[in-house]
Amino acid sequence: MHKQLEQEAAARERSAATAPPRHVGIIMDGNGRWAAARGLPRFEGHRRGVEAVRRAVREAKDIGIRYLTLYSFSAENWSRPVQEVSDLMGLLKRFIRNDLADLHRQGVRVRIIGRRDNLASDIRALLAEAEDLTRANTGLTLVIAFNYGSRQEIADAARRLALKAVAGEIDAASIDVAAMSRELETADIPDPDLVIRTSGEQRLSNFLMWQAAYSELVFLPLLWPDFDRSAFDSALAEYASRERRFGGLGTASARTGS
């Protein structure tokens, strides 16, 4: 009986190791450097980055990932040159207009996280259209982090909790990790199992900092326009090789008591 239990435990471990992560977040970095290395304008790097987005979505669906969050435009990106920001907005509009119907046919649900109050009305309308059209879809959930910053998200959540406490709606003493998580824009989305960043940079850059507390981080040396199935598989292989402990003991340590 003891041997059978060990075999069953080993089988569960193998299954967990080979199962794809439920939620993958990607910091899509390197469009400008990709273009510069080829003597092309930065816009071309961003345009090719959109093609990589299409590949990533298709591959995530094929792999069986349930949630894919893409860091497309940070709250800090407004400091870039006006023309580059305009180009990025144009690419976003083009992507939604050209790809939304296809995503909808594939059963993809689109979610947008990030502030919208300082966006142009046409951008806000397109984001709302993408969410409304795909709201009932049950396939891959594609989360677009647009005009997003994790510090701002956490500060906004803390402010809402503070206002509720002042209004007597909640007891300030009851505010805990779960209460904060419920106030975040990702309240109904599982935390990312894996966060991938391209370009070789090794930082989160204000992306899902609360949610990624126990995520596995994989940093790939290639630039985002070159991201393909091979790169995705490489990151997933690295993820599968790790033992997620969430602050506890690993399996080997638990067995040996160390």
Image: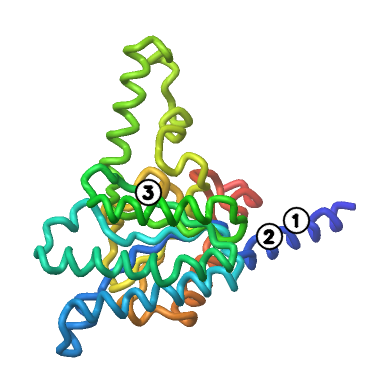
Determine whether the residue tagged by mark 3 lies in a helix, strand or loop: strand
Q: In this view of the protein, can residue 247 be seen by the observer?
A: yes
Q: Amino acid at mark 3?
A: Ile
Q: Residue furthest top?
A: 168
- Which residue is at a point 75% across and 62% down the rendered structure image? 11
Q: Earlier in the sequence, mark 2 or mark 3?
A: 2
Query: Would you say the residues marked 2 and 1 are in contact, meaning their CB atoms lie under 8 Å apart?
Result: yes
- Number of labels in the image equals 3
Q: Is residue 209 left or right of residue 105?
A: left
Determine whether the residue tagged by mark 2 lies in a helix, strand or loop: helix
Residue identified by numbered label 1: 9
Q: Is residue 10 left or right of residue 127?
A: right
- Which residue is at a point 10% across and 63% down the rendered structure image? 82
Q: Amino acid at mark 2?
A: Glu
Determine whether the residue tagged by mark 1 lies in a helix, strand or loop: helix
Residue 107 x/y as whole percent: 59, 63
Residue identified by numbered label 2: 13
Residue identified by numbered label 3: 113
Quarter-of-image position of residue 157: top left
